[in-house]
Image: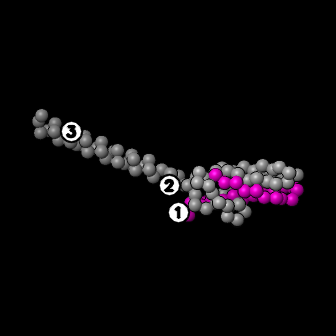
């Protein structure tokens, strides 16, 4: 094998290794770059409203300003009683970098 082909092979190995490292770093950092996510729903039964959902990449969750604990899988459930009529709830999450996300749930309680 000539010196030129050895240098080319060595360069190819270094480029491939660099691409693997950069690709894995981007893959590992993607959840942090995406920020928090939140899905939430509310159901009403016998005057009790159950607010449930799932959050990802968050460190804090609140419903109308009150802290709600998250399970290890990111799910949460809270039960509240509201008077009959229109109700709007604000569900907010915040990640460890201070980025936040807010969802508003509106429903009519009977």
**Which type of secondary structure does the marked residue at label 3 adopt?**
helix
Give me the C-alpha separation between circle 1 and circle 3: 43 Å
Task: State which region is magenta.
Answer: 75-101
Give me the C-alpha separation between circle 2 and circle 3: 36 Å
**Which type of secondary structure does the marked residue at label 2 adopt?**
helix
Q: Position of residue 78 (x, y in %)?
A: 72, 56
Q: Which mark is residue 22?
A: none
Circles 2 and 1, Cβ within 8 Å, touching? The answer is yes
Give me the C-alpha separation between circle 2 and circle 1: 9 Å
What residue does disc 1 label?
Answer: 97
Please report the residue visible at 67 percent of the width from the left and 64 percent of the height from the top: 67
Q: Position of residue 47 (x, y in %)?
A: 85, 54
Q: Which mark is residue 32?
A: 2
Query: Is residue 2 covered in magenta?
Result: no
Residue 99 appearing in the image: no
Q: Position of residue 95 (x, y in %)?
A: 56, 60
Query: 54 above or below 1?
Result: below
What residue does disc 3 label?
Answer: 9
Quick one: which residue is furthest to the top in this view? 1
- Relative to the observer, which residue lies in front, 26 or 48? 48
Mark 2 Cα shell of 10 Å, populated few (<14), some (14-19), many (≥20)? few
Circles 1 and 3, Cβ within 8 Å, touching? The answer is no
Quick one: which residue is furthest to the left in this view? 2
Please report the residue visible at 39 percent of the width from the left and 46 percent of the height from the top: 23
- Relative to the observer, which residue lies in front, 100 or 56? 56
Q: Main secondary structure of the magenta part?
A: strand
């Amino acid at each position: 094998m000539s010196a030129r082909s050895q240098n080319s092979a060595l360069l190819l190995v270094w480029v491939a290794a660099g691409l693997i490292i950069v690709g894995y770093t981007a893959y590992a950092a993607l959840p942090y770059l995406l920020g928090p996510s939140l899905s939430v729903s509310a159901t009403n039964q016998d005057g009790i409203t159950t607010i449930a959902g799932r959050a990802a990449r968050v460190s804090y969750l609140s419903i109308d300003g009150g802290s709600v604990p998250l399970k290890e899988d990111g799910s949460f459930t809270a039960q509240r009683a509201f008077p009959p009529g229109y109700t709007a709830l604000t569900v907010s999450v915040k990640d460890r970098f201070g980025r936040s996300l807010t969802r508003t749930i509106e429903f009519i309680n009977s």
